[in-house]
Amino acid sequence: MDEFRVPRRVEVDPGRSITDYLVDHAKQRPTAVLYEEKVDGAWVRHDAAWTLARVEAVAKGLIAAGVQRGDRVGIMSRTRLEWTLLDLAAWHAGAVPVPIYESSSPEQAQWILADSGAMAVVVETAENAAVVEQARSGDGDLPALRHVWQIDDGALDSLAELGSSVADAELEARHTSVGMDDLATIIYTSGTTGRPKGAELTHGNFVNVSLEAIEAIKEVFEQPGSRSLLFLPLAHVFARFVEVLVLLSGRPLGHTADTKQAVADFATFRPTFILSVPRVWEKVYNASEQKTGGGLKLKIFRWAAKVAITWSRSLDTGGPGAVLKAQHRLADKLVLSKLRAALGGQATYAVSGGAPLGERLGHFYRGVGLRVLEGYGLTETTAPTNVVRPERIKIGTVGPPLPGTAVRIAEDGEILVQGVPVFRGYHNDPEATAASLRDGWFHTGDIGSMDEDGYLRITGRKKEIIVTAGGKNVAPAPLEDSIRAHPLVSQCVVVGDQRPFIGALITLDAEMLPGWLANHGREALTAEQARTDPMVREHLQMAVDRANAKVSRAESIRAFHVLEGDFTVENGYLTPSLKVKRDKVLGDYADAVEEFYVGAAAQRATESR
């Protein structure tokens, strides 16, 4: 099938905007809890009336500070309640919040602030303020930037105090002047190649996609006590979509600063649904395996994981038999129930996006009792275009299009998207806009296929397709995702363009290494020592073999090299959204790649004598 279209189910007044839904909550159910904030280890509830009052006070402060309708206001912070309140306040005042990753360098911050024309920026810490100051004093000029406010220095209170002189009528005029066609934000893409581009997303993009998603997977939001915990960086489109989605659903949302803290916070916040990226689900699985301590407990964990996967697979082929049901009950008692408890004990649904989850993890978590609904989308599509439906889960796919969205597979396999999620263009970049929005379709740059039900399967990025010397087209993403699932592996980059075979560059996960070694009865090793350790390399080869089992011989990895160190945001090999900068890796590690092929040629020459 080359095109699938799902009609709209929800109609929205074009005069409304995102914060109209906050106003509705405050009027219709003022005591309903919208947000929960962790203070001194306890979750403090904030109802709709409190939230609207706080948002209006900060919005008035922005107006008093000279923020005009349509002005850009940067936000540079980790995920926390104040970010969401600032987002809502800026929207309520008719402004356009522009996210900046809190890990950004002065050069990155300078580019976003300058390209967006931000007249103010709210930062989280003194360190973030120093980055902005460096951005102002560097080679780039920021003439439009008039204000730098700091959250940890009481920015929201200061703005609320500043806005005390602004009349309610003035704020109301600002709020009611904003409609669905107005710009809501400019989100800068990850920038895996070249400078980040600013995707312009409207209030209509966020509202329409959120309402259609709520309608499409209503079972997720209609559970008793439905609630979610947000820990993804709010500078990323997926977290920003979650922020709006949960507000419009009227369900409580908690905030926590990062994924490491989230694992601890799950137990106390007790979410019923979790929206995350695949790397988190890999980490939860690997950490759970390591906590067994090895020996018999490790064997039991692995047996239970295998049973969970087998049980889940059986649901797609007629259901489990009596023996498998008994095994699953025992596995649940010994292992799986403990994993559910670690997630808070209430989570029954998860939505995973940002990268392929992999069938193994999808089946494992369904066997645990957590139905993972994979989705697909990009910054330019306000996050989701597709999501698996709860009533028909097809693990390994990202589901059919959301209502109001059409997906087409071009002749070369590229995924094209049309409908309510699609952005209006790149800020200050008409050439890039024209290149991506052609013939009424957004060209995603991803490769995929669809079945007769419109369920989409992602193959990889069009620009990352490797063509071997033998002419075989190889998508690196499935191989990389499979290898990265191993607890020893942090990152994997598959290589082989115009080469005789496929190879892989691998980095070790220094955080997981000590536990893995202990579970295997080994003495402690540094990551550098582990690179050449025979047992470590043997297990890495096993991970490679598992990945190779899923592809043809021409696509299989014949050699791998373990690199020194790891890819991080700080050393420039990862984007702030933790995507590998493939071109930089291939450029900087060209010598390591060459070793694959020189060594292979030498071996063939030796064998031919």
Image (spheres, rainbow, N blue to C red):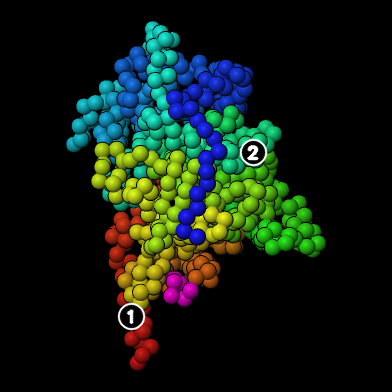
Q: Is residue 245 visible?
A: no
- Viewer-nearest of discs 2 and 1: 2
Q: Quadrant of residue 77?
A: top left
Q: How packed is label 2: few (under 14 Cα within 10 Å), some, or many (20 or more)?
A: many
Assess whether mark 1 and mark 2 are in contact (beta carbons under 8 angstroms): no
Residue that numbered label 2 is attached to: 272
Residue pictured at 49% horizontal, 23% vertical: 20
The mark that comes first in sequence, 2 or 1, is 2
- x, y percentage for residue 250? 58, 28
Locate residue 592 relative to residue 259 in the image: left or right: left
- Seen as rendered, the residue at the extreme bottom is 609
Quarter of the image with the C terminus is: bottom left
Q: Position of residue 426 (x, y in %)?
A: 31, 41
The total of numbered circles placed on residues is 2
Residue 216 magenta: no
The segment highlighted magenta reads: 552-557
Kind of residue at badge 1? Ala
Q: Is residue 142 above or below residue 542?
A: above
Image point (33%, 40%), residue name: 425
Helix, strand or loop for disc 1: helix
553 drawn magenta: yes
Residue 282: % across, % down:
55, 53
Left or right: 467, with 316 as reference point: left
Residue shown at 52% from the left, 23% from the top? 22
Q: Label 1, on which residue?
A: 601
**Residue 322 seen:** yes
Look at label 2 and name its amino acid: Thr
Is disc 2 placed on a helix, strand or loop?
loop
Q: Residues within 10 Å of mark 1 (few under 14, many from 20)?
A: few
Residue 134 numbered tag = none
